[in-house]
Image (spheres, rainbow, N blue to C red):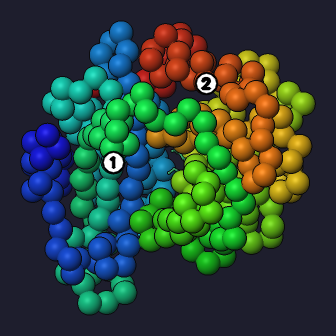
């Protein structure tokens, strides 16, 4: 099935199994591929991509942090993506957008600055490897021994493949310890985020998350803070001590693929009502927004 899926590959449409680069390419050998995972949703106007402009701006920012030169304009890539989503015939799903160096390279510096672009659509089931109904509705989490990448070592705001070893080793530790997800502290010992998710805490009705600086500039995080504000929910971003995990009334991870994923256990601590009332309210509002049932935020949807 996936093999017949069409992929946008540097200006042309190719079969999934023909979207390849050489093993000696710079992006394979050095992890220099920048990427985005972006969702599209079934709406009354057909499939629509959620906050495409924001994801593309972040992609451009990743490129600029790594001195990579896009081969096309943001507007042209937006058009190519919307066309691909339409051609896929899928009502909802995700796509992974890549910027990569396909050139063969023996050196650490990329052979050139201009990168190539690929866009690969897939369904939630294909990503999960199982039917959606069997996806977990809540998860267990623990504080990892691995710290979130320090912003003084690499540009952590670049969504680049090489940075993702950080989330990978944290998730491997979760698996070893029998937890679903990991919470990473920053190198100062404050709560940062999950391996590939943001982390939110609810305490006495306030929605809290780590300040930007040591965490990815997540589009879902930004969206949730904006939406919560319009719902009269007080939001706090700042330095959070790990002790806050013991006091939180609700905890959830968030991200484009995770959406809002409630945490039912953190370390030894079992949380009572999961999802908690505020998590549930936010989840329902997000579902209404992404499915085009919320007039206030309809401008966040880009119909294909
Ligand atoms: C480290 C990290 N934090 C947070 C997120 C969530 O970001 P977004 O909401 O933009 O998907 C991701 C997504 O991949 C991530 O890798």
Q: Residue at x 20, y 77 (%)?
A: 23
Q: Quadrant of the N terminus?
A: top left
Q: What residue is at 49 percent from the left and 70 percent from the top?
A: 165
Q: SS of the residue at dot 2?
A: helix
- Residue at left offset 53%, top offset 15%: 288
Left or right, 173 with reference to 300:
right
Disc number for residue 96: 1
- When asked about the image quadrant of residue 70, the answer is bottom left
User: Is the distance from the Cβ of mark 2 to the nearest ligand 1 atom less than 8 Å?
Assistant: no
Residue 60, horizontal then vertical, whole percent: 43, 54
SS for dot 1:
strand
* Residue 137 drawn at (x, y percent): 56, 32
Up/down of 285 relative to 31, above or below: above
Can you see residue 6? no
Q: Residues within 10 Å of mark 1 (few under 14, many from 20)?
A: some
Q: Of marks 2 and 1, which one's residue comes earlier in the chain?
A: 1
Q: Residue furthest bottom?
A: 106
- How packed mark 2 is, by other alpha carbons closer than 10 Å (few <14, some 14-19, many 20 or more), is some
Q: Quick one: quadrant of the C terminus?
A: top left
* 53, 118: nearer the viewer: 118
Q: Quadrant of residue 264?
A: top right
The structure residue drawn at horizontal position 68% and vertical position 28%, both measured from the top left corner, is 275
Q: CA distance from mark 2 to mark 1?
A: 23 Å
> Does residue 141 appear in the picture of this structure?
yes
Q: Of discs 2 and 1, which sits in the foreground?
A: 2
Looking at the rendered structure, which numbered label has been put on residue 283? 2
How many numbered circles are shown?
2
In the image, 88 versus 117, the foreground residue is 88
Q: Is residue 133 left or right of residue 142?
A: left
Residue 189: x and y in percent read 81, 67
């Amino acid at each position: 099935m996936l093999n017949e899926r069409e992929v946008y590959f540097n200006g042309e449409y190719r079969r999934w199994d023909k979207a390849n680069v050489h093993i000696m390419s710079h992006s394979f050998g050095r992890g220099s591929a920048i990427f985005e995972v972006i969702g599209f949703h079934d709406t009354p106007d057909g499939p629509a991509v959620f906050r495409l402009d924001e994801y593309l701006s972040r992609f451009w920012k990743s490129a600029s942090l790594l001195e990579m030169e896009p081969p096309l304009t943001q507007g042209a890539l937006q058009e190519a993506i919307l066309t691909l989503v339409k051609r896929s015939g899928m009502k909802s799903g995700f796509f992974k957008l890549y910027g990569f160096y396909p050139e063969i390279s023996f050196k650490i510096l990329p052979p050139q600055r201009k990168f190539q672009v690929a866009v690969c659509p897939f369904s939630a089931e294909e990503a999960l490897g199982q039917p959606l109904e069997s996806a977990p509705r809540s998860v267990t989490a623990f504080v990892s021994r691995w710290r979130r990448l320090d912003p003084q070592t690499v540009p952590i705001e670049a969504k680049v493949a090489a940075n993702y070893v950080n989330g990978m080793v944290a998730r491997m530790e979760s698996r070893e310890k029998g937890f679903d997800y990991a919470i990473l502290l920053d190198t100062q010992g404050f709560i940062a985020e999950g391996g590939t998710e943001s982390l939110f805490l609810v305490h006495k009705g306030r929605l809290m998350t780590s300040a930007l600086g040591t965490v990815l500039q997540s589009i879902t995080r930004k969206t949730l803070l904006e939406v919560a504000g319009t719902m009269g929910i007080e939001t706090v971003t700042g330095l959070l001590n790990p002790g806050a995990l013991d006091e939180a009334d609700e905890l959830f991870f968030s991200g484009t693929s995770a959406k809002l994923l409630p945490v039912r256990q953190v370390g030894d601590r079992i949380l009572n009502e999961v999802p908690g009332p505020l998590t549930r309210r936010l989840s329902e509002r997000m579902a209404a927004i992404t499915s085009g049932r919320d007039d206030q935020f309809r401008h966040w949807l880009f119909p294909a």
